[in-house]
Amino acid sequence: MSFLQKVDKQHLPRHIAIIMDGNGRWAKEKGEDRLFGHFHGVESVRNIVEGAAEIGIECLTLYAFSTENWDRPQDEVNGLMALLVDTIKKEVPTLNKNNIRLNVIGDISMLPAHAQKQLNEALAETAVNTGLNLVMALSYSSRWEIIEAVKNMALEVKSGNLLPGQIDQTVFQQYLSTKNFPDPELMIRTSGEYRISNFLLYQLAYAELYFTPTLWPDFRKENLYEAIVNYQARERRFGKTGEQVKNNQNQV
Ligand code: IPE
Ligand code: IPE
Ligand code: MG
C-alpha cells in the first residue's frame, strides 16, 4: 500500500511548511558543485507542489532562501537567485493550469530590481487562482518578520489608529506576512537537521515537526505523503491531557 493510499483525506493538515534543506550535500555526494544541487532541488519543488495540490492541501509554504543565506559565497547567491526567479517565471503557466496562487513572504526589497519585477509579475498573473496557496519564503527570516510587525504596529499606535490595549494575538497575527493563512499544522525539514533556522517562529507554536534524513533533491510526493501519514497518527493536545482530547473526539 502506498503512502498516498494511507493518507486520510478527511483529516489533512490545511497548511504544510517545508524547510527544503540538503541541496549542497546532495551535490557534494555526487562530486558536483552546490548549484547543481539547487538545480535538482527545483525538480523536487515541482513534484511536491503538484503532490500537495493533488490531495487538496490548502496552503504550502516553502523556505527557499533565508535572510542569512545572503551571506553565502556571492557565486552561490547569484546562481540561486537567478534559478529561483527564473523558475518562478517559467512555472506560471503550470500554476495557472492547476489553479495555484503564488504568494511570497520575505524582504523582497533585498532582491535585485529585475528579480523583484519578475516576481511581482508572477504574483499578479496567478492572483485570481483559488486552489492551493503556494507561499515562497524568499529572503525570509522570522525575526525580521516579527520586527517588521512590531515596527508597523508602533506606527499605527503613534498615528492613533491602534491602542496598545487592543493588541492581542488576533491583532498581532494581522501584522505578520502570513496573515492570510492559517498556522501550519505540519512542518517538515529534510536533510537530517533538527532545527528551525529562523522559519515561522511565531506560527509554528503548535505545529507537529517532522524531520527526515532524505536530502531535498531526493524528496518526492511519496515522502510528503509519508510525512502526512506520520502527522495523522499523532495526538495533538494543545496543552490539554490525552483523556480530555479523547473525550472531546468522542463527542464530535
Ligand atoms: C537548501 O540546501 C537550499 C538553501 C538553503 C538555499 P543547502 O544549500 O542548505 O544544502 P546543504 O544544507 O548545504 O546541504
Ligand atoms: C534553511 O537552511 C534555509 C532554507 C532552507 C532556505 P540552511 O541550510 O540555510 O540552514 P542552516 O544554516 O543549516 O541552519
Ligand atoms: Mg542547508
Image (cartoon, rainbow, N blue to C red):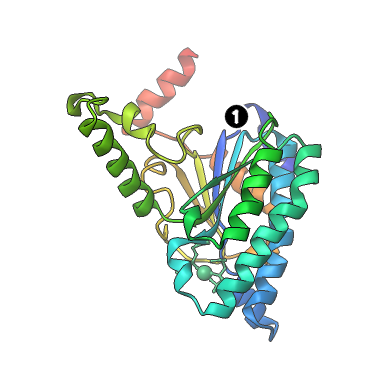
Establish if 243 lies above or below 97: above
Q: Is mark 1 within 8 Å of ligand 2?
A: no
Q: Quadrant of residue 190?
A: bottom right
**Residue placed most toward the observer, 42 or 212:** 42
Q: In which quarter of the image is the N terminus?
A: top right
Res 101 visible: no
| Residue in the image at 70% along x and 47% along y | 49
| Closer to the camera in the image, 126 or 219 | 126
Q: Position of residue 248 (x, y in %)?
A: 42, 19
Where residue 13 appears, x then y in whole percent? 56, 35
User: Would residue 45 be found to the left or right of residue 143 on screen?
Assistant: right
On the picture, is 61 further left or further right than 95?
left
- Inspect the image, locate mark 1, and give the three-letter code of the amino acid beneath it: His
SS at mark 1? helix
**From the viewer's perspective, is residue 18 above or below residue 215?**
above
Is residue 106 placed above or below 81 in the rendered structure? above
Q: Which residue is drawn at 62% across and 33% down?
A: 58
**Extreme top residue here?**
251
Judge the density around disc 1: few (<14), some (14-19), many (≥20) Cα neighbours within 10 Å. few
Estimate the x, y position of residue 219 in percent, counting from the top left: 67, 59
Q: In x, y percent, where is residue 57?
A: 64, 35
In the orientation shown, which residue stands out farthest toward the left? 165
* Residue linked to disc 1: 11
Residue 207 falls left or right of residue 39: left
Whether residue 104 is visible to the viewer of this picture, yes or no, is: yes
